Amino acid sequence: MNSSLTPTTHALLLYCRAGFEKECAAEISAFAHRDGQAGYAKTSDGSGFVVFHPHETSARVSGAGGIAFDRLIFARQLVQSAVLTGPLPPDDRITPLLEQALSVAHRFSDIRLETADTNEAKALSTFTRKLAVPLRRAAEGRNLIAEGRLVPRLHLFFLSATDAYVGVSFEDNGSPWPMGIPRLRFPRGAPSRSTLKLEEAFLTFLEREPASLQPGMTAVDLGAAPGGWTWQLVRRHVRVTAVDNGSLQTELLDSGLVEHRRTDAFRFRPARPVDWMVCDVVEQPFRIAQLVARWLAEGWCRHCIFNLKLPMKKRRDEVIRCEEFIAVTLEDAGCPYRLRIKQLYHDREEVTGYLQRLPEPGTRSTRR
């Protein structure tokens, strides 16, 4: 390898929303410690990423096991065996990048050239686009591309034109999307941009459970107006009771699939159990946690997607508080469940949760 390169110890690289680096760092540190991986996290405010350095490189850090991506709330992507490489020579960046990649794995199912999701980092997009094609050709020429579920994806995460982290992610333990961002287009006819939050939530949480959302199912949308989340359900041919004192988009009411109930979301009770309840009410997160826990505990719904609007301070603490309340409530009610919470790309100062009531008698509850 080029002697001018200065790799660091293999680390975990996590992409996150700019401004949530501290939450992401605290989370990965807590999970690593819980899993017996001592180390420390480094980041800077507004950078859009976190690096966790283990005190000792272990198979669990550099392999497909170890920290589970699905357990992380604030991480958009989990890159393992990450090594900081640079400075890259301006006349040939490809050779040292591929040499460094080969120190991590022998073959790759994909090559992703990425940056942090910040305005400063986006200035590198022209550079990475120009580098992508010749780099892939060079990798193919060296027979480094191979198919297979267990073959890792190669990530080249550029901090500048001369410095990049080189690491891998795995299909079953990372985001499927480049930079951890689903590229969704605002659908024509949708009443609000909040519709993208629910679409992303379906893609994120139901990827392995597509049968959980089928035409002909029933749903309640709490805090529905003007109808962004109801729109996503209607396009999937789900019958929706839209609960909000505000007005709904006329086209939704004309669909024949929507009943509008002008009442308070916290007072509404369904006449009979429904398949889904979704909730994007602007309210204190703990009140929303109480609401969704009751809906599941009472058997009013089997699936729930909800949004928690976070406070300015102690944001991770508030999420944990809500998680623990939901867990205690459902465990006390003898209600088997599965809960996942994630900060989605289309979330802002908020996170999105998916809560599922498990139907099998005696099934153990599953927390992240």
Image (spheres, rainbow, N blue to C red):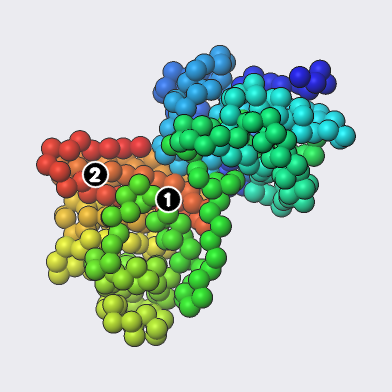
Total tally of numbered discs in the picture: 2
| Quadrant containing the N terminus in the rendered view | top right
With 123 as the anchor, is 340 left or right in this view?
left
Identify the residue shown where x is 50% and y is 28%. Answer: 29
| Quadrant containing the C terminus in the rendered view | top left
Mark 1, secondary structure of its residue: helix
Residue situated furthest left in the rendering: 361
The x and y percentages for residue 205 are: 38, 50
Note whether residue 110 is visible: yes
Nearest the camera: 31 or 174? 174
Within 10 Å of disc 2 (Cα), the crowding (few <14, some 14-19, many 20+) is many
Which residue matches tag 1?
204
The x and y percentages for residue 326 are: 28, 45
Identify the residue shown where x is 65% and y is 24%. Answer: 102
- In the image, which is nearer the foreground, mark 1 or mark 2? 1
Mark 2, secondary structure of its residue: strand
- Whether 219 is drawn above or below 165: the answer is below
Dividing the picture into quarters, in which one does residue 305 lie?
bottom left
Nearest the camera: 356 or 212? 212
Identify the residue shown where x is 67% and y is 36%. Answer: 140
With 90 as the anchor, is 275 left or right in this view?
left
Sequence order check: which comes first, mark 1 or mark 2? Answer: 1
The x and y percentages for residue 87 are: 81, 29
Task: Estimate the spatial distance between the alpha carbons at disc 1 and disc 2, rounded to whole Å.
Answer: 18 Å
- Whether 14 is drawn above or below 63: the answer is below
Which residue matches tag 2?
337
Identify the residue shown where x is 52% and y is 37%. Answer: 147
